[in-house]
Image (cartoon, coloured by chain):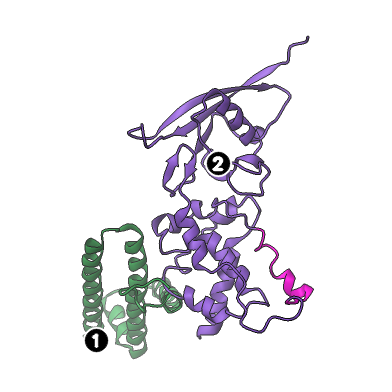
Chain colours: A green, B purple
């Protein structure tokens, strides 16, 4: 058993499952968005606002945003532990990335809920 | 006496002697072999060594059983003793196994590799009382070990795995994980839970990204990626 403190769940299997479930959510959201752009004749401010006024679109978007944040963290942590060997530098970058991801999530909630 | 037609084979071989060299270099070698004859790369190396006794490489059984002469041949890991010269493009470029510390020329330090092997406890563990004769296994259960027990620990797979290059102290690597599954799959082993628990961190097994370099280079034709997938399935069944 190899110790680690900052991997998302601290457990190999759980991180792996999180990565796969969030990948499915992100794929579904991508299909949804591509479908929307293909099927909407003219995308303008009104149609965009109507779309996000729907509660389920807001929830789906939040779910995708949350999924993106978790997916990113599992992936970025893996890349950082692969390539950034000096522990102090890696720790600093990890903290910056975590804070950035949390900020994006909070910001995202604010944006989606303000529609 | 009739003269035998000869041909020249060109080599570029990695040379490094840490006691005398500042840094490694590639040295050109030429070998004359009979035109109508094909020989194994290891035999060519042994002949080159008669010209330059300092040229260092490991070998033992010279028939693909001991796993001593794993090296990087034209950019691909393999065993010199089972690689025919005719299968290689010239100049034949030989380097030590990538990602391993070089001791001298084509000889690498295998200590870390063996530590990972040791970590997976590569021996049968059974806490039940031993039967009078031996622990029996059905032919069906025995068949589950095919494709796993044949590993000769040549390190060609682990040395071609980027996940192993970046974290050789944390990621067990394809060779070790193939053996981990060999004991997980053994009906006579009773430590399955403990073995799985030991692997369930983000590095030991999950650092495998499934790129299958290990499968591509294995000189015994084994499939570590499949074994890793089976361990993951076992973890998934146990842990969810």
Name the secondary structure under disc 1. Answer: helix
Is the residue marked by circle 1 packed among few (<14), some (14-19), or many (20+) residues within 10 Å?
some
- The residue located at (45%, 77%) in the rendering is A28
Name, please, the residue furthest toward the top.
B1
- What residue sits right under mark 1 in the picture? A113
Q: Which chain does tag 2 point to?
A: B
Is residue B69 at least partly visible in the picture?
yes
Q: Which mark is residue B79?
A: none
Magenta segment, which residues?
B135-150
Q: Which callout, 1 or 2, points to the residue nearer the camera?
A: 2
Chain letter of the residue beneath label 1 in the structure image: A
Are the numbered discs 1 and 2 placed on the same chain, yes or no?
no
Query: Percent x, y for residue B84?
Result: 66, 36
Q: Secondary structure at mark 2?
A: loop
Percent position of residue A3, x then y: 36, 73
Q: Which residue is mark 2?
A: B58
């Amino acid at each position: 058993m190899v110790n680690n403190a900052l991997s998302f769940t601290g457990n190999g299997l759980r991180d792996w499952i999180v990565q796969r479930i969030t990948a499915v959510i992100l794929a579904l959201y991508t299909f949804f968005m591509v479908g929307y752009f293909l099927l909407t004749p003219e995308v303008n401010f009104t149609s965009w606002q109507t779309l996000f006024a729907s509660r389920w679109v807001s929830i789906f978007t939040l779910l995708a945003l949350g999924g993106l944040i978790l997916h990113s963290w599992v992936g970025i942590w893996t890349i950082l532990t692969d390539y950034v060997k000096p522990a102090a530098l890696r720790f600093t970058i990890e903290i910056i990335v975590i804070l950035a991801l949390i900020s994006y999530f909070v910001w995202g909630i604010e944006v989606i809920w303000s529609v | 006496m009739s003269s035998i037609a000869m041909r020249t084979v060109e080599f570029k071989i990695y040379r490094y002697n840490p006691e005398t060299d500042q840094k490694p270099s590639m040295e050109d070698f030429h070998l004359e072999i009979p035109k109508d004859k094909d020989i194994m790369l290891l035999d060519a190396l042994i002949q080159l060594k008669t010209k330059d006794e300092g040229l260092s490489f490991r070998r033992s059984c010279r028939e693909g059983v001991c796993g001593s002469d794993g090296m990087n041949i034209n950019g691909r890991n393999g065993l010199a003793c089972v690689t025919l010269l005719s299968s290689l493009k010239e100049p034949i470029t030989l380097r030590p196994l990538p990602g391993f510390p070089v001791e001298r020329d084509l000889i690498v330090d295998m200590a870390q590799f063996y530590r990972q092997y040791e970590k997976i406890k590569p021996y049968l563990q059974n806490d039940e009382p031993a039967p009078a004769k031996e622990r029996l296994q059905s032919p069906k259960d025995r068949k589950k070990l095919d494709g796993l027990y044949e590993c000769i620990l040549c390190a060609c797979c682990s040395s071609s795995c980027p996940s192993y290059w970046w974290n050789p102290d944390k990621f067990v690597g394809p060779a070790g994980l193939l053996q981990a599954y060999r004991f997980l799959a053994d009906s006579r082993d009773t430590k399955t839970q403990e073995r799985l628990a030991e692997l369930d961190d983000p590095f030991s097994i999950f650092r495998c990204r499934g790129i299958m370099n290990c499968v591509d280079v294995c000189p015994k034709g084994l499939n570590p990626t499949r074994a890793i997938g089976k361990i993951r399935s076992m973890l998934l069944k146990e842990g969810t």
